[in-house]
Amino acid sequence: MDARHHPLSEEQLARLRRRLGERLIVLIGMMGAGKTSIGRRLANILSLPFLDADSEIEKAANLSISEIFEHYGETHFREGEERVIARLLSGGPAVLATGGGAFMSEATRQACGDMGITVWLKADVPVMLERVRKKGNRPLLKGADPEGTMRALLKEREPIYALADIVIASREAPHQVVVSDILTALQAHLHQGATA
Ligand code: S3P
């Protein structure tokens, strides 16, 4: 189904995978930016495994993210997040969706830079808020003013997210449009300096 809705031919996709080599495509950005659903589609089109860091953390801990925050606190969560992402980055080519705070860790940024191509999915606050509101499973936004919290987090994180290799506007457009934008940007990025 997805195959009809993106700009690259099979040959171009194969070349993209070749140029990616052992690297991963690492999606970063705020909660509600669409990293998981967009990442899954992107992986599907590229015939690569899809990895979701939050799910892997939950599996490793046998607890939900909310439970980890509640029982052990954010610092503990962040340590686990660093370890899990380091492990996922060493597992070969894949599309990896990271949690919104992951890229704030210098160690994770370094590892992502070494092993992956980083893509910041940049979305507007109302779009992200609407998406997270539907699920209600983000411990950081459980307070009285989720919008204020999100804006404050964004202000702190934006300059760091901006270090990504590629920046993509994750608009309210259908996900397939955003996926197409990523594919086009990846192709251009991987083409730079490539010879084959
Ligand atoms: C967080 C984002 C969440 C999850 C945790 C903390 C953050 O992931 O890792 O609730 O600090 O922004 P998503 O970005 O997938 O929602």
Image (cartoon, rainbow, N blue to C red):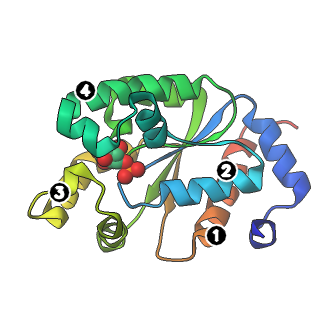
Residue 176, labelled with which disc? Answer: 1
Counting residues from the N terminus, which is met first, the one under dot 3 or under dot 2? Answer: 3
Q: Secondary structure at mark 2?
A: helix
Q: Residue furthest bottom?
A: 173
Quote the CA–CA distance across marks 1 and 3: 30 Å
- Tell me: 128 left or right of 173: left
Residue 158 vs 102, above or below: the answer is: below
Camera-nearest label, 3 or 2: 3
Residue 192, labelled with which disc? Answer: none
Camera-nearest label, 2 or 4: 4
Along the viewing direction, whichever of 54 and 111 lies nearer the viewer? 54
Q: Secondary structure at mark 1?
A: helix
Counting residues from the N terminus, which is met first, the one under dot 2 or under dot 1? Answer: 1
Q: Is mark 3 within 8 Å of ligand 1?
A: no
Q: In percent of the image, x 49 and y 23: which residue is there?
A: 86
Write down the residue under mark 2: 186
Residue 142, labelled with which disc? Answer: 3
Q: Quadrant of the N terminus?
A: bottom right
Residue type, numbered disc 4: His
Write down the residue under mark 4: 76
Q: Residue furthest right?
A: 11
Residue 16 vs 125, above or below: the answer is: above
Q: Residues within 10 Å of mark 2 (few under 14, many from 20)?
A: some
Q: In percent of the image, x 33 and y 30: which residue is there?
A: 105
Residue type, numbered disc 1: Gln
Residue type, numbered disc 2: Leu
Q: Quadrant of residue 101?
A: top left
Along the viewing direction, whichever of 138 and 177 lies nearer the viewer? 138
Camera-nearest label, 2 or 1: 1
